[in-house]
Image: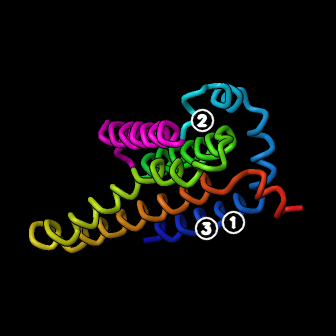
Amino acid sequence: MDIIVISILLAFSGGVLFLHYLPTYLRKIESSRFVYQLQEADWFQKPVYAGLFIFGVNALLFSLVWLLVLMPLFQQVWSVLLLLSMTTLCSVWFWMVTSRAYRQPSGRWIFSVIGSSFYLFCFLLLLYIHTTVAPVDLYLEVSFFYLIGAFIALAASIIQFFVTSIEPRQLEKEQT
């Protein structure tokens, strides 16, 4: 129980620090080579293709985490928490990079909805498992963790939507 409380406190404090230093991170990301390469790619400036690109990277990171969790090395609680934390940081970094690289203001909502829909699908799948399969076949604790996973996926979808839908120039104007 103590590790859960510590994890929640670390996540909350990390989120507060992230929001506080967000403009600084965005300025550093602006000069990234990856941002420049995505800005120069014609296909990335189309909202559907850019959204599908984010969707694919989210699916790749999610699959990589679950493949690594199944390995015996990552069966310890601390290693799973470390792996999930590192993947979360990579995801948020990637969302900010793609938000900076996407320059078309008209399709930003489409880009954000398609990109964040991966975690929305995860939310709906986990909610479906929780309501249909989990109460019948599994223990109460497992059912509860399906529900927690569903709400984490919903939170990830909402956070990604807001990180990618806000235009970087709008954020800088609000900060000054």
| SS for callout 2 | helix
How far, Cα to Cα, is label 3 from label 2?
A: 34 Å
**Is 174 drawn above or below residue 44 in the view shown?**
below
**Is 128 drawn above or below residue 23 in the view shown?**
below
Residue sitting at 51 percent across and 63 percent down? 158
How far, Cα to Cα, is label 3 from label 1?
A: 6 Å
Q: Position of residue 175 (x, y in %)?
A: 84, 62
Q: Position of residue 20 (x, y in %)?
A: 77, 62
Q: Which residue is mark 2?
A: 45
Magenta segment: 47-76
Three-letter residue code for mark 1:
Val
| SS for callout 3 | helix
How many neighbours does mark 1 have within 10 angstroms: few (below 14), some (14-19), or many (20 or more)? few
Q: Which residue is mark 1?
A: 16
Q: Position of residue 66 (x, y in %)?
A: 34, 42
Q: Which residue is mark 3?
A: 12
| SS for callout 1 | helix
How many neighbours does mark 2 have within 10 angstroms: few (below 14), some (14-19), or many (20 or more)? many
How many neighbours does mark 3 have within 10 angstroms: few (below 14), some (14-19), or many (20 or more)? few
Side of 1 relative to 17 (left or right):
left
Residue sitting at 61 percent across and 25 percent down? 41
